[in-house]
Amino acid sequence: MEGALLALCNWSTLGVCAALKLPQIHAQLATRSARGISLPSLLLELAGFLVFLRYQCYYGSPLLTYLEYPILIAQDVILLLCVFHFNGNVRQAVPYVAVFVSSWFVLGLQKWIIDLSMRE
């Protein structure tokens, strides 16, 4: 019984997260405007999701404990690209993408160096 309840909670969380940003994305696409979306707030949220996801991956947590975060990150990236597109400055997204991608790999490289040094 407890296992079924836990599975229901896991899947319902994933379902809610899969639809969390869809109304915002739909509203932006329907109005063809980024009005009402705060870019700093969106970037802060995305950074927080990325840090948490990297932390979970770094320490090898089970996938079901953080599976909603890749879903939320994908939706935030789509929302971010819509904001840049409708504001007319898509090229401005390049530095943000570069920072997020490089920080992801730097944290992975740091774990690899620590693991390598522990073996010696």
Image (cartoon, rainbow, N blue to C red):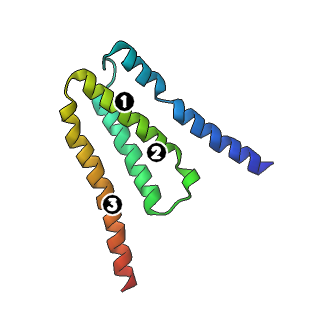
Kind of residue at badge 2: Pro
Q: Considering the numbered disc 3 on the image, is that residue within a helix, a strand or a loop?
A: helix
Residue 4 is tagged as: none
Badges 1 and 2: C-beta atoms under 8 Å apart? no
Image position of 120 with respect to 60: above or below? below
Q: Position of residue 22 (x, y in %)?
A: 47, 26
The image quadrant where one finds the C terminus is bottom left
Q: Nearer the viewer, residue 109 or 114?
A: 109
Mark 1: few/some/many CA within 10 Å (<14, 14-19, 20+): many
Residue 70 is tagged as: 2
N-terminal-most mark, 2 or 3: 2
> How far, Cα to Cα, is label 3 from label 1?
25 Å
Kind of residue at badge 3: Leu
Q: Residue at 35%, 78% (x, y): give it.
A: 116
Residue reaching furthest to the top: 31
Badges 2 and 3: C-beta atoms under 8 Å apart? no
Image position of 108 with respect to 45: above or below? below
Q: Residue at 39%, 35% (x, y): give it.
A: 76
Kind of residue at badge 1: Leu
Mark 2: few/some/many CA within 10 Å (<14, 14-19, 20+): some
The residue wearing badge 1 is: 79
Q: Considering the numbered disc 2 on the image, is that residue within a helix, a strand or a loop?
A: helix
N-terminal-most mark, 1 or 2: 2
Residue 107 is tagged as: 3
Q: Nearer the viewer, mark 2 or mark 3?
A: 2
Q: Position of residue 92 (x, y in %)?
A: 19, 34
> How far, Cα to Cα, is label 1 from label 2?
14 Å
Q: Residue at 19%, 27% (x, y): give it.
A: 89
Q: Residue at 47%, 63% (x, y): give it.
A: 59
Q: Position of residue 29 (x, y in %)?
A: 37, 19
